[in-house]
Image: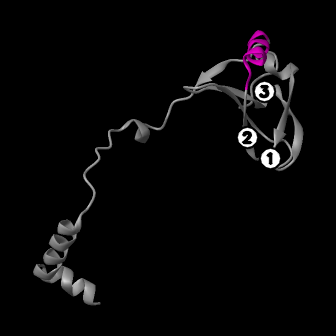
Amino acid sequence: MATAPDSDPRVRYEIWVSCDDCGDVIIPGEDCELIRSALDVTLAYACVTCGRRGASPVADSQLERLLERGFVVANATPALELLEPHPIASPFGWDDLLRFHELLDSTALIVELLRD
């Protein structure tokens, strides 16, 4: 996500974060993103030492300072699979299991496949 230094105000800042592998590191501002989820705002970054992606929650007071300095908050959009309806059927019971075995016995092709 490289942009020209003149157009991105974040290049003037360094953000102190804690990487799970490397400990405390300093990330260039232009390599950080603010992402708003349903619950809060997080700072997403890649560690400059190991490259591991990380995220840290941002307190309201810190968020205000970052917004004043030109950082922009992007809205997180969930994967479409999470928004699809997932109807829930009743759990399998003993009768279902018995019907399945009867189906296996009555279907010659399935019986032949299971024998191999």
Q: Residues within 10 Å of mark 1 (few under 14, many from 20)?
A: few
Q: Position of residue 55 (x, y in %)?
A: 71, 36
* Residue at point 80%, 47% (across, down): 20
The residue that mark 3 highlights is 30
Dot 2 amino acid type = Gly
What is the distance, in whole Å, between disc 1 and disc 3 at their CAs?
21 Å
**Residue to which mark 1 is pinned:** 20
Q: Is residue 92 left or right of residue 26?
A: left
Total number of numbered discs in the rendering: 3
Nearer the observer: mark 2 or 1; the answer is 1
Q: Is the residue marked by circle 3 packed among few (<14), some (14-19), or many (20+) residues within 10 Å?
A: many
Q: Do residues under tags 2 and 1 come within 8 Å of each other at their CB atoms?
A: yes
Q: Which residue is mark 2?
A: 54
Viewer-nearest residue: 52 or 82: 82
Residue 67 forms part of the magenta stretch: yes
Quadrant in the picture for residue 17: top right
Element on which disc 3 rests: helix
Which residues are the magenta region?
58-68
In the image shown, does 51 or 111 lie closer to the viewer? 111
Residue 70 part of the magenta-drawn span: no
On screen, residue 58 versus residue 108, left or right, reads: right
